[in-house]
Image (cartoon, grey):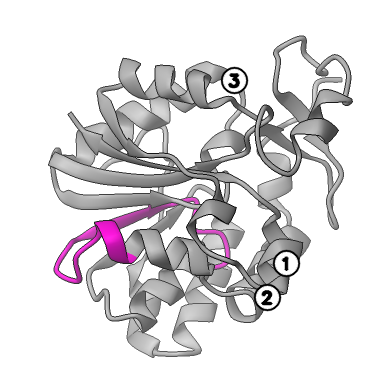
Amino acid sequence: MERDPQAHWLETETALHYARAAVRVGMWASERVLIERHFSKSHRILELGCGGGRVALGLLQSGYPDVIATDFSPIMVSLARAVLADHDEAWEKIVEQQDATALTYPDACFDGAIYAFNGLMCLPRRAHRLAALRSIHRVLKPGGILLFTAADREKGAYAAYRAKEGEPDDGIPGDRWHESDTSPVFMHSSTETETRGELSETGFTVIECPLSTEVAADGPLVRQFAGETRFFVVRKS
């Protein structure tokens, strides 16, 4: 029986894990550096795959007032609202249920977008990633900025480990089901060249794409939670 890549994100235990991370882990030092470098406090920012509200909470607490946080999973949306409301009751209103591959917002209505912690790479198959990138491109204003991360299977701390993983489950390099604290989760590990190609195909220009360890020294909780990943900061062409 074929496994459902969405199932993991619809589970209560998974949502609770990410809700706890929103408070315990918080925004990474590396995320904060790049957000402050590329996003103005006046920007209207869309977050995709908000999970338990970790990045949205960090943005709001850092003085970014115009944020819309979204997730396709109803349980994630519910818990993200609860996490944000625990800090400010008004904040729960910023969380909405949206499918990143088919956003319903008007064209060119956001200054920037964030798809944190490899969320884009949890979409199954290249076609889904391209659909999400095109959907995000549509709702960004001309010159709008997208920041996201992608696990790199060729460079960084986990390259040697990934090289030993053997053939992927579906024959597509980088596709893999991983065990987690709750249930198996699908994630695609890309290469910089591969992701640059997908970005070019969907109308984005790369501004910078450093490994997280090249940006800032994240603390032990972040390293345990996320390890090392590659950031992409790109502009709508």
- Cα separation between marks 2 and 1: 5 Å
Q: Are marks 2 and 1 in contact (CB under 8 Å)?
A: yes
Q: Is residue 96 visible?
A: no
- Residue in the image at 65% along x and 33% along y: 155
Residue type beneath disc 3: Arg
Question: Where residue 58 sits: x, y (%)?
Answer: 44, 75
Disc 3, SS: helix
Question: Where residue 145 sits: x, y (%)?
Answer: 25, 46
Residue 148 falls in which quadrant of the image?
top left
Q: Is residue 181 left or right of residue 94?
A: right
Identity of the residue furthest to the front in this view: 214
Specify start and end residues of the magenta stretch as a single range.
36-53
Q: Which is more toward the observer, 84 or 77?
A: 84
Magenta span includes 94:
no
Residue 153 falls in which quadrant of the image?
top right
Q: Which residue is mark 2?
A: 20
Q: Which residue is mark 1?
A: 17
- Residue in the image at 50% along x and 47% along y: 72
Identity of the residue furthest to the top in this view: 171
Disc 1, SS: helix
Residue type beneath disc 1: His
Q: Which is more toward the observer, 190 or 133?
A: 190
- Cα separation between marks 2 and 3: 29 Å
- Residue in the image at 63% along x and 74% along y: 25
Prevailing SS of the magenta stretch: loop
Q: Which residue is mark 3?
A: 125
Magenta span includes 40:
yes
Disc 2, SS: helix
